[in-house]
Image (cartoon, rainbow, N blue to C red):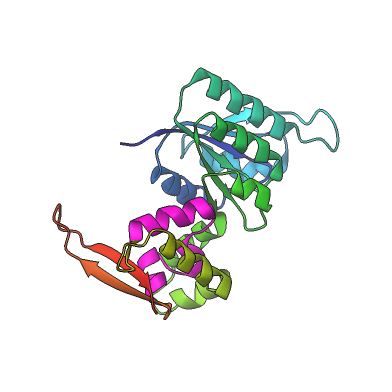
Amino acid sequence: MDINLAVLIDGDNITSAYVKEMMEEIAKYGNPTIKRIYGDWTQPHLNKWKKVLLENAINPIQQYGYTQGKNATDSAMIIDAMDILYGDRVDGFCLVSSDSDFTRLATRLREAGKHVIGIGEKKTPEPFIVACDRFIYIEILKNKSKQASASKDSKEKSTKNDVDKITPKVIELIASTIADVTDEDGWAFLGDVGSLLQKKQPNFDSRNYGFHKLTPMINSIDQFEIESRDNQKGRLKLIYVRNKE
């Protein structure tokens, strides 16, 4: 069953270019019952956001910059988040920003038992990323938009410069996670592996490395082997993985 989410967007910090893809991504994790974006709407840099707000039913919250050098938008977003929390109106929050100022907010929301999803650019500071249950890079959504408009022949060319390399450090993370949930024969259910990877590293996502799902990513690494098993409860196969000896 879907959980209800409050989607709070830092308009001063996030581009409007991929708002459609962003909202589609958020819908995978819950029902966005509250959708707000914060900024000083008298400023020209937010004009592009104005064009997509009605299309996506996002409520703009006006916040004037009272003091030069101080980010009043952040303060307004934090106050609203706490009001929503105390009103017990949602099960989780989606904080859309690349700003480390929201680290304490994410931590506080999780302390209250709320699920917290972060969305931001790859430049987002590590403290904010690890303060979330899950963190999604907006560059992934950028790649999705490119793929939708690219032809089959040009798809790889349009996205390969935007994906991360699978480094030995990433392989070691996957290997140790498999070992953590393995059975006596060395096999681990891939769903359990994926869940634990997310807990260990909230920004882990196979799409960062150019793979739509975790299965093909692991299948591309020679250090692991994959086995597909029949599912007694349905038609979908169960995928298991283990470290090669």
In this image, 54 relative to 29: left or right?
A: right
Q: Position of residue 66 (x, y in %)?
A: 81, 28
Q: Quadrant of the C terminus?
A: bottom left
26 in relation to 112, above or below: below
In this image, 65 relative to 7: left or right?
A: right
**Residue lying at 55% horizontally and 35% vertically, measured from the top left:** 110
158 in relation to 25, above or below: below
Span highlighted in magenta in the image: 190-219
Look at the image and say whether residue 196 sits in the magenta stretch. Answer: yes
Q: Position of residue 204 (x, y in %)?
A: 51, 58
Q: Position of residue 12 (x, y in %)?
A: 68, 42
Residue 169 shows up from this direction: yes
**Residue lying at 44% horizontally and 49% vertically, measured from the top left:** 25
120 in relation to 71, above or below: below
Q: Nearer the viewer, residue 24 or 132?
A: 132
**Residue lying at 60% horizontally and 37% vertically, measured from the top left:** 106
Q: Nearer the viewer, residue 50 or 129?
A: 129
Q: Position of residue 170 (x, y in %)?
A: 54, 69
**Residue lying at 75% horizontally and 31% vertically, measured from the top left:** 72
